[in-house]
Amino acid sequence: MQVVSDRVSILNKDGIFSLVVLPFDKKWKINLMFVWLLLWTISGVFYISLYVNASGEADFYRYQYDLAVKQNKKDVSVKIYKDIEKNQQKRLFIIGLLAFGLTSNTKWVKRSSLENTVKKNFG
């Protein structure tokens, strides 16, 4: 049996090739991923509050826009419409950040729970 590293070994006997890779990670990597998960969770709460605030701004901009249209103030309504578009872009960006954080956190949690199951059963 040839030991390649502390996690990998190779056995080639009687025409049968066997490669064994042990499912252990370094402790500092697990701690770093936990910090990553924690920071994304905290920032997720922050981004959700930003989204709620941006939604409130959108309602205010729509109210101002309707008022400017009723009063036939074309220059004001054009400016407010641009603000509405900026607000929509801001909300889409926040949704993108939340989606990225949710998918990365979900994948990491699934991966870590799978590794714990393997370690309990085979380690």
Image (tube, rainbow, N blue to C red):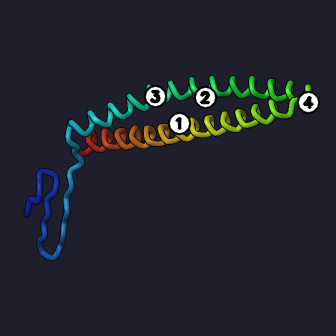
Q: The disc labelled 3 sits on which kind of residue?
A: Ser
Of discs 4 and 1, which sits in the foreground?
4
Q: Are marks 1 and 2 in contact (CB under 8 Å)?
A: yes
Question: Residue 117 placed where, x, y %?
Answer: 32, 40
Q: The disc labelled 4 sits on which kind of residue?
A: Asn
Distance (Cα) linking label 3 and label 1: 9 Å
Q: Which mark is residue 98?
A: 1
Residue placed under numbered mark 4 in the picture = 72
Q: The disc labelled 1 sits on which kind of residue?
A: Leu
Q: Using the rendered view, name the quadrant where residue 69 is placed.
A: top right
Q: Which badge, 4 or 1, is on the more N-terminal residue? A: 4
The secondary structure type at the circle numbered 1 is helix
The secondary structure type at the circle numbered 2 is helix
Look at 26% across and 41% down and name the residue there: 119
The secondary structure type at the circle numbered 3 is helix
Rendered position, 120 above or below 71: below
Rendered position, 89 above or below 68: below
Q: Which badge, 1 or 2, is on the more N-terminal residue? A: 2
Front one among 115 and 78: 78
Rendered position, 113 above or below 54: below
Front one among 97 and 22: 97
Q: Which badge, 2 or 4, is on the more N-terminal residue? A: 2
Q: The disc labelled 2 sits on which kind of residue?
A: Tyr
Look at 63% across and 25% down and name the residue there: 52
Look at 11% across and 71% down and name the residue there: 13
Q: Using the rendered view, name the quadrant where residue 94 is placed.
A: top right
Residue placed under numbered mark 3 in the picture = 43
Front one among 67 and 2: 67
Q: Using the rendered view, name the quadrant where residue 5 is placed.
A: bottom left
Q: Which badge, 2 or 3, is on the more N-terminal residue? A: 3
Residue placed under numbered mark 2 in the picture = 51
Distance (Cα) linking label 2 and label 3: 12 Å
